Structures are given as C-alpha cells and as structure tokens.
Image (cartoon, helix red, strand yellow):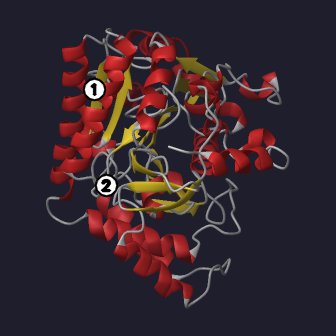
Amino acid sequence: MKQTDSKKLFKQALNVIPGGVNSPVRACRSVGIDPIFIDHAFGCFVYDVDGNRYIDYVGSWGPMILGHRHSQVIKAVSTVLERGTSFGAPTDLEIELAEMVIAAIPSIEMIRMVNSGTEATMSAIRLARGFTGRDRIIKFDGCYHGHADTLLVQAGSGVATLGIPGSPGVPESFVAHTLSLPYNDIETIQKVMDEQGEKIACIIVEPVAGNMGLVAPVDGFLNTLRELTEKTGSLLIFDEVMTGFRVAYGGAQSLYDISPDISTLGKIIGGGLPVGAYGGRQDVMGHIAPQGPVYQAGTLSGNPVAMAAGIATLEEIHQPGFYDSLDEKSERLTAGLRSSAEQIGIEITVDRVGSMAGLFFTGSEVKNFEDAKKSDLEMFSAYYRGMLQRGIYLAPSQFEALFVSSAHNNEYIDQTIRAAAEVFAEIKG
C-alpha cells in the first residue's frame, strides 16, 4: 500500500497550514504516522491520492449516515446549485429543514441554524446564560463541545488526543465560571448542584459521549441531570451534534426519553456539508435576537446548499426500517470485534449505541474519561496502523467513536472483522 503522494502533499501542506492540517486530530501524530490525503469517496469507501481504497468508519466524523455521495443527496445539491450557492437571506429551504427537525424532536419547538457544532454550543450557552441571568455552567470531563473558550476545560476529542487539559490563549477569567465534572458520576453532580445549583445557568452534556471514545450514559445519569436542572431553574443542554439523527431519528433524547431545554445539532442535518443548529423550548428560544436580547448572528447560516443536503438526508433516513437495518449492521461489527479479540486473547472493551461504537484496549469497563485514559494507547496505535494497512479507515485517535453507515454491507463488515483479527494476532505476537 503506497502513500507517496500523500507524503508529498503533507510536506507541502506543512509550509502553508499549521501542522499541515486544518483540524488537529487529522495530523495522526498519536498513531505515529503522517495523514493520508483523500481524493474521493463513494458509498462506504474513501480513496486516497495514491489510489488506495479503504472501508470508511469515520464517515466525515459522523454525518455520512447514508455513505458518501448518496444519489438523493447529490441530486438535491445539484438542483439547488441551479438557484445559487449562497444568498445571506432567508429561503424556503431553511423553513423546510427546521420543520423536519421540529417534527422529529419534540423538545425542539424553535430552531436557529448556524454553521458548525462549535457555533451551536457556544450560542446555546450564551442563550442559557441570558435566559437565566446566571454565569456558571457545568460540563463533563471528556465531553467535547467545540473549541469555544469557555468549553476547553478537560475536553475530549482532539484536545484529549494531544494530551492537553485546555489551551493557551484562553484567559483564566473565561473559564472561571465553567465547572467540569466526571461523566456518569451521579453522586458528584448531585453534591455540586445541592451546593451551587441556584448559580448554575446550564448543564451541557453529550447524552452519549462520542469524544472520549464511545461511552454510554449509566442508568439514571441523564434523568438525574433533568431532575436537578428542573429543581434549580437551570437549563439542560443536550449536545447532539454527533448523536442527533445518528443513534435514532429523534436523537439520543428519544432513546433515553429525556427532554432537554436546548439541543444542539449538526453533522447529519447538513448531509455532510458544514451545518450546526440549536433549538429548544419556545420561551427560551424567544430570547434570541431579533425576537429577544441575546445576540447571535451568522452571515452564511441556513446556506441553501447545506439545507438541501440536510433535507434529502433526513428524508432518506426516515424511511421505515432504516434504523433497524443500521442497528443490525452495527451489532454485527461490534460483536465480531469482541469475539475476535476474545479468541486471540486481547483485552478490549467495545460499546455501542445505535450506529456509533467505540473500542478501548482495556479489560475494564469504561464509564468516564478517567477510565478511557487507562486504555493502552500504544496498542491502539498499532491497531490503527495495522487496520489502515489492510484497507480499513478509522479515526486516528483512541478518543473518537466509529460510525457505521447504510452503505456498509455484511461483506465489508466481515472483511473488517477479519482484518481486526489479523491485527489482534500481530499485537498479541
């Protein structure tokens, strides 16, 4: 498997782009290689500039639930391009997508489109502070909510991959009102809310954590957050940028039957194009300008091309049986990985929620960020490189989830399982 042109491009990129990449985790430093450069993609495959084909479990970090270049999404984008690429003005497509999201997620009564997940979470927190008149917020260790200043405290995803607790350039005063607590720790959140609940504007959480690897909520954790915020007058924000329409059509909140006050979305509602959104109760959303005093704006928000791609994607995934089929494929993959490792004598922990999954090189249960960090990172690096050599494209970090799409079939899933078995055997020696 040659990667000559990828190496040339990375060397060229280093001269003009910091670290040679436009998002840190893409640099692949934690897995000991240079990044591969993608030329094109189709279905469940990505192809690099050297002509190598890979079965893709990154899916552009989640949004490609239909696989790459799905015919209906391409058709929708091609059609809207006849109208233009951007207007910076209202279009009918914004309304159509907003109505689809509201119909799918009952807790969302009004929604504001933005351009990224970071923008969505940043705006949702500003809204929560403006609505409650409070400053303090609570997040959880290992949950990544974008790179806004107030949220780069014990964040997961690329921050965890680089092994840093936060970031230079963020004044201490910016994070002074941010409390970061252990994920899934019911006792600690109860204690903190008993002591400070009246000062807390919001609790923001990934209902299924996907940025420290895949970590599911323990029984009672999300319910406790809902009860505590209702008791204290704080708002509950579900960051469903990753899980929204991914783990279920109504998001993680439909799986766990919890209604947050605000939800943030992205990924799938843009059909692979850059999109974010935040929405919630009508009385809360009514505080956003120009209806209310909390200011938030975006010149390209509601971009017609992205709206069209999102509408087409939601139409496809709302078909009967879509999620049942996706769930079966995802279970086939995770069960196969678990069985292969067990047969070879490699200790792993594999968890799954819907079509999101995570694999940790540890024999212990992973319930929070501290547990995740106990995973053998050197073993993961060897696993990543071995899988890549066998044509399997994974996220280059222990602290990222993998994603199954409807374009994956049993043949490619079984091929992935066989490749993993070979790599496990190599690691075992």
Mark 1 lies on residue: 421
Residue nearest the viewer, comparing 149 with 329: 329
94 sits to left or right of 429: right
Mark 2 lies on residue: 106
Label 2 is placed on what type of residue? Pro
The number of callouts visible is: 2
- Any part of residue 233 in sight: no
**SS at circle 1:** helix
Give the alpha-carbon distance from disc 2 to disc 1, as whole Å: 43 Å
Name the spot of residue 133 as percent of width and height, x first: 64, 38
Which image quadrant for residue 97? Answer: bottom left
86 sits to left or right of 96: right
- Any part of residue 154 in sight: yes
Residue at image point 25% right, 28% down: 337
Q: Which mark is residue 158?
A: none
Label 1 is placed on what type of residue? Ala
Residue nearest the viewer, comparing 85 with 194: 85
Which image quadrant for residue 386? Answer: top left
